[in-house]
Image (cartoon, rainbow, N blue to C red):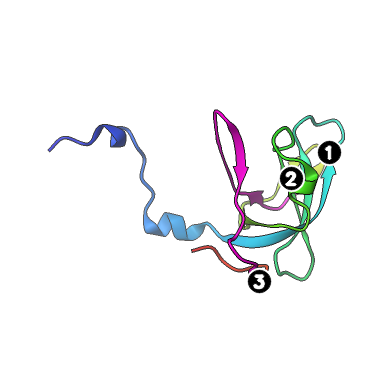
């Protein structure tokens, strides 16, 4: 049986692979421009933890700070920390993009910070 064209060369993740990724909902508490970086924002995010997390994101050309401030979004929360422009990023906001730009995702109702995506 031939593989469907849209599956040719595709690498599949197992459910075990997927379960390794921790995704949680968080509220953006602040949005700052990273000096010397054209695309970066520094977000402080309440993920229901003891203190907010600093997450850097290269979405500045697509999203205005007021479109994120005080709103909830999904974040990957178990990525290894990464230093960008001397600042440590402790996660990643989830977004999608196409030829029309970039879209962030909001929960359809307010949910507790730190709630897991599943």
Residue 10: give x, y in percent of width and height: 34, 37
Residue 35 figure quarter: top right
What residue occupies the far front of the structure in this picture?
108
| Residue identified by numbered label 2 | 56
Question: Compared with residue 85, is residue 66 higher up or lower down, i.e. above or below?
Answer: below
At horizontal 77% and vertical 58% (from top left) the residue drawn is: 70
**Mark 2–mark 1 CB contact (< 8 Å):** yes
SS under mark 3: loop
Q: Nearer the viewer, mark 1 or mark 3?
A: 3
SS under mark 1: loop
Q: Residues within 10 Å of mark 3 (few under 14, many from 20)?
A: some
**Magenta segment range?**
89-112
CA separation, marks 1 and 3? 28 Å
Label drawn at residue 25: none
| Residue identified by numbered label 1 | 34
Question: Compared with residue 20, is residue 65 higher up or lower down, i.e. above or below?
Answer: above
Magenta stretch holds residue 41: no
Residue 115: give x, y in percent of width and height: 60, 69
User: Does residue 63 appear left or right of residue 74 in this picture?
Assistant: right
CA separation, marks 2 and 1? 9 Å
**Mark 1–mark 3 CB contact (< 8 Å):** no
Quadrant the N terminus occupies: top left
SS under mark 2: strand
At horizontal 82% and vertical 40% (from top left) the residue drawn is: 86
Magenta stretch holds residue 93: yes
Which circle's residue, 2 or 1, is located before the other in the chain? 1
Which circle's residue, 1 or 3, is located before the other in the chain? 1
Label drawn at residue 112: 3
């Amino acid at each position: 049986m031939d593989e469907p064209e849209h599956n040719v060369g595709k690498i599949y993740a197992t459910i075990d692979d997927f379960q390794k990724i921790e995704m949680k909902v968080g509220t953006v508490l602040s949005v700052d421009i990273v000096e010397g970086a054209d695309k970066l924002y520094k977000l402080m995010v309440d993920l229901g933890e003891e203190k907010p997390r600093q997450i850097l994101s290269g979405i500045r050309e697509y999203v205005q700070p007021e479109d994120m401030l005080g709103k909830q979004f999904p974040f990957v929360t178990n990525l290894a920390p990464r230093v960008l422009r001397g600042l440590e990023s402790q996660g990643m906001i989830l977004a999608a993009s196409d030829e029309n730009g970039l879209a962030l995702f909001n929960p359809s109702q307010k949910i507790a910070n730190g709630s897991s995506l599943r």
